[in-house]
Image: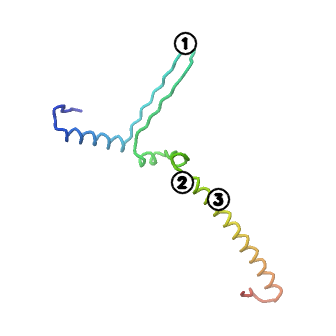
Amino acid sequence: MPTDLTGSPNRGSAGLVDILDRVLDKGLVVAGDIKVSLAEVELLTIRIRLMICSIDKAEEIGLDWWKYDRHLSPGREQLLQENLELREQLQLLERRVASLTRASGRRARVTGKGLIPD
């Protein structure tokens, strides 16, 4: 890619914006391993994996770990608790409806008629 080192600052910043846009749109992966050995005995291995991309691109390729990290999504715990409470309320309401349905069925059999309106 040819560069113009004596060009105007606006052209340089536009180039940087274009590069950032391309990196965030397409993604950039840097991978490497560092191994420390002594007398052919591996003492330490460090694996480095760096991925730079936009959130949209990350979700497109199936990365969404930040949604479940409690440090990065502080409201998630509250949502989980609220969800649990709503499920408990739903179960309670379903039990009440079932017991009312059974009670109405018993009254209908006793009177010999259909359901009795309350």
Q: Which residue is mark 2?
A: 75
Query: Where is residue 43 shown, x and y percent of the image?
Result: 57, 18
As drawn, the residue found furthest toward the right would be: 110
| On screen, residue 81 above or below 64 | below
**Structure colour scheme:** rainbow
Label disc, if present, on residue 38 of the rendered structure: 1
Nearer the observer, 75 or 48: 75
Q: Earlier in the sequence, mark 1 or mark 3?
A: 1
Position above or below: 112 against 46: below
Q: Which residue is mark 3?
A: 84
Residue at point 52%, 50% (across, down) = 73
Determine whether the residue tagged by mark 3 lies in a helix, strand or loop.
helix
Q: SS at mark 2?
A: loop
Place of residue 96 in the rendered image (x, y in percent of width and height, measured from the top left): 73, 73
Image quadrant occupied by the N terminus: top left
Up/down of 103 relative to 112, above or below: above
Q: Pointer 1: residues within 10 angstroms few (<14), some, or many (20+)?
A: few
Residue sitting nearer the eye, 23 or 73: 73
Residue type marked 2: Gly
> Residue 3: percent from the left, percent from the top?
21, 32
Which residue lies at the image location 82% right of the left edge and 89% below the top edge? Answer: 111
Q: Quadrant of residue 83?
A: bottom right
Left or right of 72, for residue 14: left
C-alpha distance separating marks 3 and 2: 14 Å
Please state which amino acid type lies under the numbered disc 3.
Leu
- Looking at the rendered image, the disc whose residue lies closer to the viewer, 3 or 2, is 2
| Residue at image location 58% in from the left, 56% down from the top | 78
In the image, residue 44 above or below residue 92? above
Q: Quadrant of residue 82?
A: bottom right
| N-term mark: 2 or 1 | 1
| Mark 3 residue crowding within 10 angstroms, few (<14) / some (14–19) / many (20+) | few
